[in-house]
Image (spheres, rainbow, N blue to C red):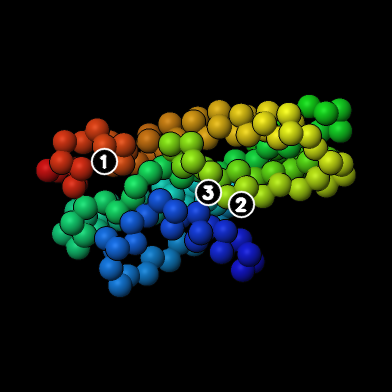
Amino acid sequence: TMEIQRLIGRALRAVVDLDQIGERTLWVDCDVIQADGGTRTASITGAFVAVVIAFGKLVEKGTLKKLPVTDFLTAISVGVLPDGEEILDLCYEEDSRAHVDMNVVMTGQGEFVELQGTGEEATFSMPQLQTMLSLAQEGVNDLVELQKEAIGDWADVITGKHVSGASKES
């Protein structure tokens, strides 16, 4: 839907230096082939990997001077089950019965990009919110590690561990 497209676009723009890409448009088509819930969050997390790879190819071709990605980006769901348990990465069954459902989009540095939370069947307290956000941070950290594996050497460029920070070759 248009709402999901806008969510993914907002999230990606948060970690891309738009001045570096100039007058270019990058189309990202997010098809989640297999999922047990969390398709929005999977789309954002996977789209980030695709964007890094695409920009990396433009750097390798010399079209871009350096990778315009400023940080990692992931998204994950958290929620509260009917028994009050706060959980991370809800599957379809958990999501369908959760009293609270929240999507959390964060950078690798722990900055929030977007929070979408709803008390579906109940309200939730500040301590529950804090627990859900802590769970989300743990999940984000795990997802960033998986993203690093997926993008290889470009991970060092994003984290600043690469000597020049310009490209993985120099």
The percent position of residue 3, horizontal first and vertical second, equals 63, 64
Q: Please, what secondary structure does the residue beneath circle 3 have?
A: strand
Q: Position of residue 23 (x, y in %)?
A: 30, 72
Q: Image quarter for residue 59? A: bottom left
For residue 157, which numbered disc appears in the image? Answer: 1
Q: In this rendering, which labeled residue sits more in front, label 3 or label 1?
A: 3
Residue at image position (26%, 41%) is: 157
Give the SS element for disc 2. helix
Q: Earlier in the sequence, mark 2 or mark 3?
A: 2
Question: Quick one: quadrant of the N terminus?
Answer: bottom right
Instruction: Please report the residue visible at 38 percent of the width from the left and 39 percent of the height from the top.
Output: 150
Residue neighbourhood size for the residue with mark 2, other residues' Cα within 10 Å, grouped as few (<14), some (14–19), many (≥20): some
Kind of residue at disc 1: Val
Tag in front: 2 or 3: 3
Which amino acid, mark 2? Answer: Arg
Dot 2 corresponds to which residue? 40
Residue that lies at the very extreme toward the front in this rendered image: 126
Q: Quadrant of the C terminus?
A: top left
CA–CA distance in space, label 2 to label 3: 14 Å
**Which comes before the other along the chain, label 3 or label 1?**
3
Q: Can residue 34 be seen here?
A: no
Q: Are marks 3 and 1 in contact (CB under 8 Å)?
A: no
Element carrying mark 1: helix
Give the residue at x 20% y 43%.
165
Mark 2 or mark 1: which is in front? 1
Q: Is residue 57 above or below residue 87?
A: below
Residue drawn at the location 60% of the way across and 43% of the way down: 104
Q: Real-space Cα distance between discs 3 and 1?
A: 21 Å
Q: Amino acid at mark 3?
A: Val
